[in-house]
Image (cartoon, rainbow, N blue to C red):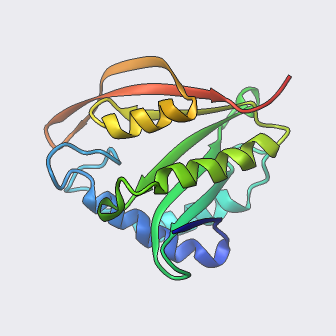
Amino acid sequence: MFVRPLEFDDLRRYIAHFAECNAESGADGAPHFHVYGRSEPYDQRAALLRERGRWSTPLDAAGWRRAWGLLLDEDRLIGHLYLEGGTLPAEMHRARLGMGVRREHYGRGGGRLLLAAALAWARAEPLLEWIDLGVFEENATARALYAAIGFTECGRTPDRYRVDGHRIDEIEMTLPVGGP
């Protein structure tokens, strides 16, 4: 397993991987990855167009996104992590983190590898001072990983999402990565 930044040539594979993670979320009961229900199809064509724009947006502009892939070999993407900028000039010092690893590869250290790569990049970016994320309360494994890396809980939203009959509380976490 290894991690590398994803490039434009990886976009189709990234979108297909995202669709696979969406399909896995909730397969064993409560969703753990995305807030889309089983009846909400993931539009890969729209996602491809959206991501192409986000990946080409500079870091000092609203709506940028950068992504890293967890790969078994050069072709098999088994996990991803993205950082994205906000939509307001006043929040450009913060990035939002999203991450997913294919279920069959849970517990093998891939999430920690993804976090290490993305956080090293973020700490080298002078514009970024904070990384924020939201994690489902039921996802104790992810919460423990984020806490071990240094993220701290900064808020909870009860009943944040309702997906396929499940009420999901969201925990907000944050990590300082640079700045004055």
Residue at 26 percent across and 56 percent down: it is 40
Asked if 88 appears above or below 74 in the picture, the reply is: above
Query: Is residue 164 visible to the viewer in this orientation of the structure?
Result: yes
Q: x and y percent of residue 75 in the render?
A: 51, 82
Total label count? 0
Left or right: 108 as drawn, with respect to 129: left
Left or right: 6 as drawn, with respect to 12: right
Quadrant the C terminus occupies: top right
Left or right: 127 as drawn, with respect to 14: right
- The residue nearer to you, when weighing 177 against 84, is 177
Asked if 135 appears above or below 79 in the picture, the reply is: above
Query: Is residue 60 visible to the viewer in this orientation of the structure?
Result: no
Q: x and y percent of residue 162 in the render?
A: 23, 35
Q: x and y percent of residue 82 in the render?
A: 57, 52
Asked if 98 appears above or below 162 in the picture, the reply is: below
Residue at 50 percent across and 46 percent down: it is 98
- The residue nearer to you, when weighing 69 against 85, is 69
- The residue nearer to you, when weighing 153 against 96, is 153
Residue at 20 percent across and 55 percent down: it is 38
Residue at 69 percent across and 50 percent down: it is 64
Looking at this view, name the residue that lies furthest to the bottom: 75
Q: x and y percent of residue 107 in the render?
A: 36, 53
